[in-house]
Image: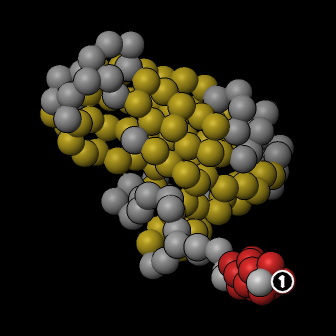
Amino acid sequence: MVFKRRLTVLALALFAGCVPPDSACTERDVSAWVPSTAEFATPIRCDGKIVGYDLDIDSSKDMTSRSWAIAFDGPHPGGVAAISADIDMLTPTKRVATLYSGTTKLAEVEGVLTTVSASSASHVAPGPLQRAYTVTVPAGLHYRGQIRNMRW
């Protein structure tokens, strides 16, 4: 009886280990976000949605710095506004997260780590809000990386 129970537990453990992990994409769809240019970016697709961009920004050919930005104008329910994204291009590449309400800049933060985030210092009234990220590669450099896991 004990042998049968152990055999059943072993069989269940082996079967549970053979089930493939959940491959569903958990990142948000960013297809409503508008890139400043398609020149440096290729969309990253997962489960039929755009979840980020592969960036290839070359500022080494003519020694001129290059920037790529992406923005989203959408409703804000009210309260503290916040955004964050994972941008795996490090210093000296400049990565900035910005929040605007109309023409008023609520927050602008230059990232130091790969996660770049910004939030308003106080509550923001319900209404339209612009969320944006900008990546700038200095003259003379060529960077490849990604922007993903955008949260707002």
Residue at position x 25%, y 45% from top?
74
Compared with 141, 17 (above or below) is: below
Q: Secondary structure at mark 1?
A: helix
Whether residue 67 is visible to the viewer of this picture, yes or no, is: no
> Crowding at label 1, few (<14), some or many (≥20) Cα neighbours within 10 Å?
few
Residue sitting nearer the eye, 19 or 126: 19
Q: Tell me where residue 72 appears, x and y as whole percent.
A: 35, 47
Left or right for 136, reference 51: right
Q: Residue pushed farthest top?
A: 122
Residue at position x 57%, y 69% from top?
44
Residue sitting nearer the eye, 137 or 17: 17
Residue sitting nearer the eye, 99 or 119: 119
Residue at position x 65%, y 74% from top?
21
Compared with 145, 49 (above or below) is: below
Quadrant occupied by the C terminus? top left
Whether residue 72 is visible to the viewer of this picture, yes or no, is: yes
